[in-house]
Amino acid sequence: MCVANLKAVPMKSVAVVACMDVRLDPMEIFGLDLGEAHIMRNAGGVVTDDMLRSLAISQRKMDTKEIWLLHHTDCGMSGLDNDAFLAELEKEDGARPTWHPRGFNDVEQDVRDSYQKLVEDPHVDARRVRGFIFDVHTGKLHEIGLAGRDAHGHPAEKVLD
């Protein structure tokens, strides 16, 4: 695949923060083509310190203007007992990790928690953030409201096909 004709700056000025789950294809879900958005993935699609670093670079050096948070149903991080997992790693490896697993019980609340981390970071512009939950059973994408409204000022709940 030759990508010499593409620039490193996303054509749609979007950064997507998504879960690393193999059932998710953020580009297909959002109808994006190669070169249109930065796609950043981790376990759970949660906003971590490293994600904040990547988003700050994406916004300040690659001119992204909007952030889309993509979580999904039946996530492996849902129900993960953070303390038990850390204790398990410490017991098996002899050292407790310095990072936090960020397991959660409510996927919608976790999208809102990730949004809140963006808002609290002084290096990330969180004025244009949208939150989504992809239903792995139906293939439907649900946009959830953040702070009562989505990034376009629409009412908090709507379903995208």
Image: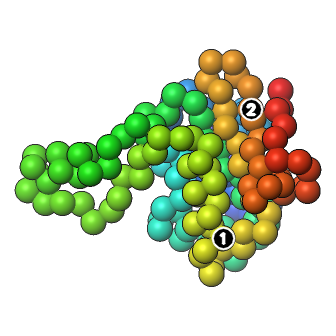
Residue drawn 59% across the image and 48% down it: 109
In this figure, what is the number of numbered marks? 2
Q: Which amino acid type is shown beneath numbered disc 1?
A: Val
Percent coordinates x, y for residue 156 in the rendering: 82, 47
Instruction: Please say if 84 is above or below 57.
Output: above
What is the residue that sits farthest to the front in this orientation? Answer: 148
Residue drawn 51% across the image and 28% down it: 74
Q: Which residue is mark 1?
A: 119
| Cα–Cα gap, marks 1 and 2 | 23 Å
Percent coordinates x, y for residue 111 in the rendering: 62, 50
Percent coordinates x, y for residue 63 in the rendering: 76, 70
Residue drawn 83% across the image and 32% down it: 160
Q: Which residue is mark 2?
A: 141
Q: Which mark is drawn over residue 36?
A: none
- Looking at this view, is 26 or 88 the one in front? 88
- Looking at this view, is 32 or 113 the one in front? 113
Instruction: Please say if 130 is above or below 54.
Output: above
Q: Quadrant of residue 64?
A: bottom right
Please indicate whether residue 32 sits to the left or right of residue 102 in the image. Answer: right
**Way the structure is coloured:** rainbow
